[in-house]
Image (cartoon, helix red, strand yellow):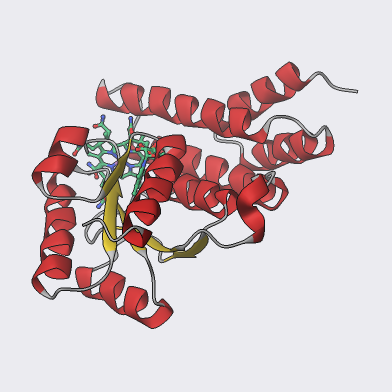
């Protein structure tokens, strides 16, 4: 039996080597060994962060980021169906429409948050990246969502999160808006009147639960 630590290492090595086939193999091994999948996702996120730092300092270039993100996504796709469901999962906690805002093509963090919300018991509609305010709203209306969750990784794209919140409030729509992503801070979320915020997928789940609790309790 391969040691779990070794498999985590294999997964990280595969991402750093941009080797999608090895990333898939390592992910499958993690599934077979019933490893801690949330730890695997956290480790992959940390590796992506390191790759991002190297991009920032000019050590790596855009194609490296694309390849590393593809590896991580391929591994996450294998792990996702096996993620343990929270005990509360039997009844749906609420419905979430999630996506990355218009102009922003980053969707790795978004997929992780979507995955984690699903396993926590939310019904999740993942619209992917580059989602306009209108697309968020029309999907939320169509599925009678409780929450719209918007991700932004580019600082400039945060203005779209603001637009989304303004549109929802101006039109008096019944949706609560949660935001997150690299450059999004708690202060920014408060400043633009977001109902929820998360630094990572765990806080995203906590925040979504909190938002639903307040919504059901009739608190604005
Ligand atoms: C991978 C990557 C890419 C890939 C994306 C592939 C993909 N399919 O997503 C590609 C190569 C396409 C890319 C392109 C670009 N990128 Co890029 N990219 C990254 C990188 C290295 C990693 C992002 C990532 O996947 N992180 C891992 C995930 C797990 O973390 P996360 O996304 O932060 O998500 C977590 C939390 O933020 C939170 N969260 C996320 N969303 C949400 C939503 C809600 C509702 C909640 C509650 C929480 C939440 O939970 C997640 C899980 O813990 C970052 C560097 C970094 N340090 O983040 C740069 C980075 C984001 N990119 C950057 C830039 C500049 C670009 C480009 C403009 C480069 C260029 N010159 O063309 C383009 C932009 C294209 C576009 N229009 O969007 C900058 C952004 C700077 C800024 N603040 O504006 C960064 C920070 C790199 C840097 N240091 O300069 N990039």
Q: Who is closer to the viewer here, 203 or 217?
A: 217
Q: Who is closer to the viewer here, 8 or 17?
A: 8
Q: Single out the residue that lies furthest toward the right.
A: 1
Q: Which quarter of the figure is the N terminus placed in? A: top right
83 left or right, relative to 112: right
The image quadrant in which ligand 1 is located: top left
Does residue 91 lie above or below 205 as drawn? below
Q: Where is residue 147 in the image (x, y as percent from the top left)?
A: 35, 61
Q: Single out the residue that lies furthest toward the front.
A: 217
Q: Single out the residue that lies furthest toward the bottom.
A: 142
Q: Position of residue 129 (x, y in %)?
A: 35, 59
Q: Position of residue 20 (x, y in %)?
A: 62, 42
Taking the image as drawn, is residue 152 in sight? yes
Q: Which residue corresponds to the image point at 22% horizontal and 58% vertical from the top-left?
A: 103
Q: Count of labels shown? A: 0
Q: Which residue corresponds to the image point at 23% horizontal and 61% vertical from the top-left?
A: 102
Q: Which quarter of the figure is the C terminus placed in? A: bottom left
210 left or right, relative to 218: right
Does residue 148 lie above or below 157 as drawn? below
68 left or right, relative to 147: right
106 left or right, relative to 78: left
Taking the image as drawn, is residue 16 in sight? no
Q: Which residue corresponds to the image point at 32% horizontal and 59% vertical from the top-left?
A: 215
Q: Which residue corresponds to the image point at 40% horizontal and 36% vertical from the top-left?
A: 203
Q: Where is residue 27 in the image (x, y as percent from the top left)?
A: 70, 38
């Amino acid at each position: 039996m391969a040691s779990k630590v070794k498999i985590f290492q294999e997964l990280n090595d595969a991402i750093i080597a941009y080797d999608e086939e090895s990333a898939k193999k390592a992910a499958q091994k993690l599934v077979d060994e019933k490893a801690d999948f949330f730890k695997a996702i956290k480790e992959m996120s940390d590796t992506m962060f390191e790759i991002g730092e190297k991009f920032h300092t000019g050590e790596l270039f855009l194609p490296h980021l694309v390849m590393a993100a593809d590896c991580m996504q391929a591994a996450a796709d294998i792990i996702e169906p096996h993620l343990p469901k929270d005990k509360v999962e039997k009844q749906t906690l609420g419905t979430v429409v999630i996506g990355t805002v218009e102009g922003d093509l980053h969707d790795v963090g978004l997929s992780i948050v979507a995955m984690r919300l699903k396993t926590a018991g939310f019904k999740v509609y993942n619209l992917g990246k580059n989602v306009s305010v209108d697309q968020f709203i029309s999907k939320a209306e169509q599925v009678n969502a409780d929450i719209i969750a918007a991700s932004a990784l580019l600082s400039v794209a945060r203005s779209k999160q603001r637009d989304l919140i303004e549109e929802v409030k101006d039109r008096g729509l019944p949706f609560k808006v949660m935001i997150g992503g690299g450059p999004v801070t708690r202060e920014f979320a408060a400043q633009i009147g977001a109902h929820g915020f998360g630094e990572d997928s765990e806080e995203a789940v906590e925040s979504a639960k909190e938002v639903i609790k307040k919504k059901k309790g009739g608190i604005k």
